[in-house]
Amino acid sequence: MRVRVRFSKLGKVRFTSHRDVARMWERALRRIELPVAWSEGFSPRPRLHFGLALSTGHESEAEYLDLDLDEAAGLDVDLAALPARLTPALPVGIDVVAAAAIPPGTPSLQAVVTSCSWRIEVVGDDGRPTEAEVGAAAERVLATSEIVTTRTRKGQDVTDDIRPYVLAVTVAGPSTAGIELECELGTSPRGLRPAELVAALGDGWREGRVRRTHQWMQLDGARQEPLPVATPAPHAEARAS
Amino acid sequence: MRSADRGPGHPLVGAGGHCTYNPEPLADFVDFFVLGDGEEVVGEITDVVSAWKAAGGDDRTAVLRAAGTVAGVYVPSLYDVAYAGPEVAAVTPRYPSVAERVEKRTIADLAAWPYPKSQLVPLTEVVHDRLNVEVFRGCTRGCRFCQAGMITRPVRERPADQVRQMVADGLRRTGYDEVTLTSLSTADFSGIGDVVADVVGDPANCGQVSVSLPSLRVDAFTVGIATELQNARRTGLTFAPEAGSWRLRQVINKLIREEDLYGAVESAYSQGWRRMKLYFLTGLPTETDEDTLGIARLARHCVEIGRKYHKNPSVTVSVGGFVPKPFTPFQWFGQNTLAELTRKMHLLRDELRRDRGVQFKWHDPKATTVEGIVSRGDRRLGAVIEDVWRHGGTFQEWTEHFDLDLWLDALDRHAMTVEDLVYRHRTEEEVLPWDHLSAGLHKDFLWQDWRDALAEVGLEDCRWTPCYDCGACTGYGIEHVVASAVPPAGGSQGTGQDLARGGEVPVTLSPRPVPAGVG
């Protein structure tokens, strides 16, 4: 049986890497003695399938993990109680907010997620930008049809147009150190990084705190979350700070 | 930064562990040091500090004087040091309440201390990222270069059932899937084979838990256990013969015969291992070039054994320069000079240059020289360490930041020399900077062992043979705690050797050791 789990990554734990988070999960699953299915072969691993990697330093309210339970013992697992069992076995800041069985044959998270919503703080190298400046820059980006940028990938310069990935940008208001944007950025065929968007907005601006708020997949033409949650992590922020 | 400059609002700085058996180089910076096992003393120190806090807690000298009366706690500011040239003349307590000699703390029985119960689990991947369960403390193989083996005596084994329980509980609490059974020589643990088999086979672990053993002994029995542990990724095995000839191995009391090493290597290659790593020391007392080149000979022979089983067997030879350590029989030995160590490394490098299958790695002799400075320095070294730091010498352990000149210049500015601190042989009469501290070992035992070393006399492991009266048991009224009455695999050193070629094993000490002639 395959189970999809949704969790947050908030506060100081944001400085752990994707790989370290994977290892935290393996330990947590062993600590609560969840009957996870194991891979075959010379060095068996628990069968976990992570979604899109989150950059080290970014927070998230919408991380996903698919895990395969042991065929026999997995049937006895009470999925409704799973979030409350898992959260205490995970580091502060990682809270499991939902868990549900997914039907066999469900495509992988990496394959179905097409965009993510982000809250991105824009901060300035010299002084904080104003709401109007950032708003104007956002409108300028949305108004252009092409934003050609060059980045280094595996030691080679790659030039491409990032405009198709910018699906929405609005100013949410001031934050402690800058101006916060609400954005939706595409993930396919490659994921647009928040820092790339901020660089396109204007010189001398950098990303500050960044938080992924949603991952989206398309289902029959409608935008939908891989696993919705009614109230996202009520106490997560208090625990994590 | 210096203890003397810290005031009421600053933390108390304490240190412990093996390195603090010569705490003098850090005496200016650290408020108190703890010698020996921490299990009991940490509670006593906490009591002293909380009583002091309850009484106001603003006079640092008061809490340090109180801490100085706790057995095993050394507060350097309570002692005056007098010097005589490069040597220490005397270390004297400043108050009558303070012990003239601080004895290490030793817990009699590990079984009473099943800790840690909740090992810290780092969120990021670190070295040794697994559960650690200590299966015994102490080692009496008696390798003369090894400080750990000298200062942690006697051998105290944890009961096998407690080991099993700690492994099971620890894995459940941490979520780790790997456990290391730690000690100075885990293959010596009584019934190690059963414990390993039980952990690997425990149904609660679903067969998903792997076990690793540090510090493998050089023999076929050990290889057998290692093979049992790693059914899958069978990559490399490490052995530490330490010296290139039997003569020199008798000097250092690492009593491994060539047959033992070749037997272990043959057994490993035949059971599917492909890479061997051999650890050696160079710059050992009485070492000749013949001994040094013996390292190359051993390595070559191991590769040849490997060729019987694999097309491209590989042997990595890793050589470190020897640094004499306090509380070992070699504490009187003058370390090889930088030039001499470099020459020996180059000798080996040139010798092994054309050998396919042998990779030669060596520890930078410059770093070894600085290790020598700190290993046996006295309190005056504090100013040198501060000087190095003030001139930008941070992260000196990192090869890319290490700078020998910083150290040499700093020594120069403080009128000290590497010759005095590192290269000089100490004499029997000399007051050593750590003579006011005690690891339980009688100084005349160490001196006798030093004489035996120079006479190329090997000593058997005392956990299964008569007592040499080193002082570690008798001085504290404790004993070895060893479940097995017989040594493993037929010999007291576990390697089945007879010591005939090394001469008789002396079981009594001459009351007055032979006068100094060496050094």
Image (spheres, coloured by chain):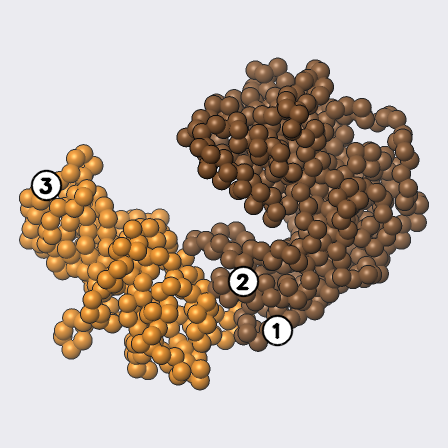
Chain colours: A orange, B brown
The residue under label 2 is: B170
Q: Is residue B47 left or right of residue B229?
A: left
SS of the residue at dot 3?
Answer: loop
Q: Is residue B71 above or below residue A2?
A: above
Tag in front: 2 or 1: 2
Q: Is residue A3 left or right of residue A44?
A: left
Mark 2 in CB contact with mark 1 (< 8 angstroms)? no
Q: Is residue B493 left or right of residue B212?
A: right
User: Do the residues indicated by labels 2 and 3 lie within the same chain of the protein?
Assistant: no
- Residue B429, x across and y down, in percent: 80, 24
Q: Residue at x 65, y 48 (%)?
A: B359
**C-alpha gap between disc 1 and disc 3:** 64 Å
User: Do the residues indicated by labels 2 and 1 lie within the same chain of the protein?
Assistant: yes
Q: Quadrant of residue A168?
A: bottom left
SS of the residue at dot 2?
Answer: helix
Residue type at mark 3 is: Thr
B480 or B373: nearer the eye? B480
The residue under label 1 is: B201
Residue type at mark 1 is: Gly
B435 or B93: nearer the eye? B93
- Residue B295, x across and y down, in percent: 75, 44
A214 or B272: nearer the eye? A214
Identify the subunit bearing mark 1: B
Q: Residue at x 16, y 46 (%)?
A: A175
- Residue B394, x across and y down, in percent: 48, 31
The residue under label 3 is: A130
